[in-house]
Image: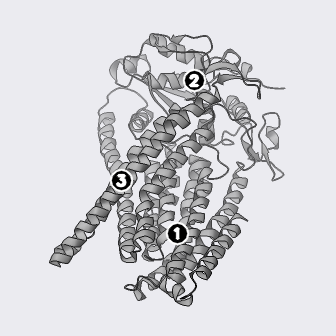
Amino acid sequence: MKVTLSALDTSESSFTPLVVIEFAQDVKEETKEWLKNRIIAPKKHGGAQLLFRPLLNKYEQETLENKNLYLVGASKIRMLLGAEAVGLVKECNDNTMRAFTYRTRQNFKGFDDNNDDFLTMAECQFIIKHELENLRAKDEKMIPGYPQAKLYPGKSLLRRLLTSGIVIQVFPLHDNEALKKLEDTWYTRFALKYQPIDSIRGYFGETIALYFGFLEYFTFALIPMAVIGLPYYLFVWEDYDKYVIFASFNLIWSTVILEVWKRGCANMTYRWGTLLMKRKFEEPRPGFHGVLGINSITGKEEPLYPSYKRQMRIYLVSLPFVCLCLYFSLYVMMIYFDLEVWALGLHENSGSEWTSVLLYVPSIIYAIVIEIMNRLYRYAAEFLTSWENHRLESAYQNHLILKVLVFNFLNCFASLFYIAFVLKDMKLLRQSLATLLITSQILNQIVESLLPYWLQRKHGVRVKRKVQALKVDIDATLYEQVILEKEMGTYLGTFDDYLELFLQFGYVSLFSCVYPLAAAFAVLNNFTEVNSDALKMCRVFKRPFSEPSASIGVWQLAFETMSVISVVTNCALIGMSPQVNAIFPESKADLILIVVVVEGIGSCSYGS
């Protein structure tokens, strides 16, 4: 017998809570009732057909705060049908990977009608998120009770509720028992070991697991560079020009490691099922708006927005703004060089120990300014990319990443290229690279992990005291968990984490031949980064919604592009070295030709 969504019961009063919706204070009851009815309504009537109830009953709401917290869940059958709708891929009894269907559910490994563990909690939360985000306005003109919150056909209801401040946040709950098991095998014991990537994937989803898998792989890939760099640094510390051998090793290393990662990534995602998880047509992103119409390709009703309007916004507004920011970054860089000249002149005039320390001050100040500018620009890039109104989440991410990478690359590396190829000062290049790398790593550890963890610990103590003081008969465990998690910071995705690794890869692959300790510092940073990132995922931030991924996405292309730039840069540095110039003392044309050929071989071997 075929089970349809219309046959499901959405009136269950007790269910396993998976997702929390927090309304603003003093939200009108008619608004809550309207959203509840849309969430529990059948799919054929434009609803999500999920389960919905308040965290507190009427009596508890009279005696406790936090009256605006609501729980969302779904029945087992609804979850299974939702898994089919989103295209989850599961392992069959014959060990093949296939898209799950409810009709053939008995053919899938681990499925049992009496077993609720076939879908992980992360997968269930992903299904609920998908359904909530695709609740769209049909004939409503406004949100009931809030005439200023206008609606039009095709507008995402959840997006409008969030942007209007009616809904504060929507977040998935942690599974405390499963989380404790994961922590015990992940980061609570500081030991050199592989991470439990499959367990991370089971709890947080493929996107998070791929980031930690890449972080682990990249860290181990840096070890050969660190091992070679340490003695190289010790024995030729004062001879800044003897970098040809290390630069040659850089050429090979930066090309090979990304090719090896692609194979390992494909093996992981095939085992998880996401490599084969195909969506015929990606759904419009929640922030996309337009006039409701029929998509000519899919035949589905969805918001439509003219592409020429988007292109005008990109080329007439976003592009000039990015160029203006790049110019400002170069202007700040020239101020930094003026400070370097001032500090050097002061040191030459006095020659004291105090002025020798002062030589590092301009680089430290510049490194801090770079971090501030990167973060401010990130906010502006997010606003512009959202304003461009991209239909697909993938298009939104690609445009955002492109804006951020172009600015970050110029902001972080322009000074190093200027020192290397214009000033040709290898001593200053080594000093600047070391200062920028170490300062950025320290700042990232403080801002991203230590500070949020300290603030979260303080909040956790306050929540526990409040719950222990309660005298009413409630489920204190669930109540405490929801209250604690709702005040946690929101994890905004792997963007910043990949960006940090991208910049680190640039520092190591581009110019580490003149500062061989760069890889060693990167390894040390990444070993602590694994544990600090794991800590913030488990204890600092709310649990993020799971997102299926088949790869690290556009970041693979970003790292490959950096690798190509690294090949060209190291070939140029080799061509500038005194050792190579000594081989061709008369004919510079032969030297240039050889450098070009080596660059071409490196680029071609990478492309193949």
Q: Position of residue 87 (x, y in %)?
A: 73, 38
Q: Helix, strand or loop at disc 1?
A: helix
Residue type indicated by callout 2 = Ser
Which disc number belongs to residue 430?
none
Q: Nearer the viewer, mark 1 or mark 2?
A: 1
**Residue at the image position 65 percent from the left and 23 percent from the top:** 304
To which quarter of the image does residue 532 belong? bottom left
**Residue at the image position 49 percent from the left and 48 percent from the top:** 404
Q: Position of residue 505 (x, y in %)?
A: 51, 64
Q: Is residue 10 above or below residue 278?
A: above
Residue type indicated by callout 1 = Ser
Observer able to see residue 21: yes
Q: Residues within 10 Å of mark 2 (few under 14, many from 20)?
A: many
The residue wearing badge 3 is 331
The residue wearing badge 1 is 509
The residue wearing badge 2 is 156
Residue type indicated by callout 3 = Tyr
Observer-nearest residue: 208 or 107?
A: 208
To which quarter of the image does residue 490 belong? top left
Q: Are marks 3 and 2 in contact (CB under 8 Å)?
A: no
Q: Position of residue 16 (x, y in %)?
A: 56, 32
Q: Residues within 10 Å of mark 1 (few under 14, many from 20)?
A: many
Mark-to-mark CA distance, 3 and 2: 42 Å
In terms of sequence position, does the residue under pointer 1 or pointer 2 come before the other? Answer: 2
Left or right of 436 in this view: 147: right
**Residue at the image position 57 percent from the left and 78 percent from the top:** 249
Mark-to-mark CA distance, 3 and 1: 26 Å
Q: Position of residue 200 (x, y in %)?
A: 57, 53
To which quarter of the image does residue 23 belong? top left
Observer able to see residue 74: no
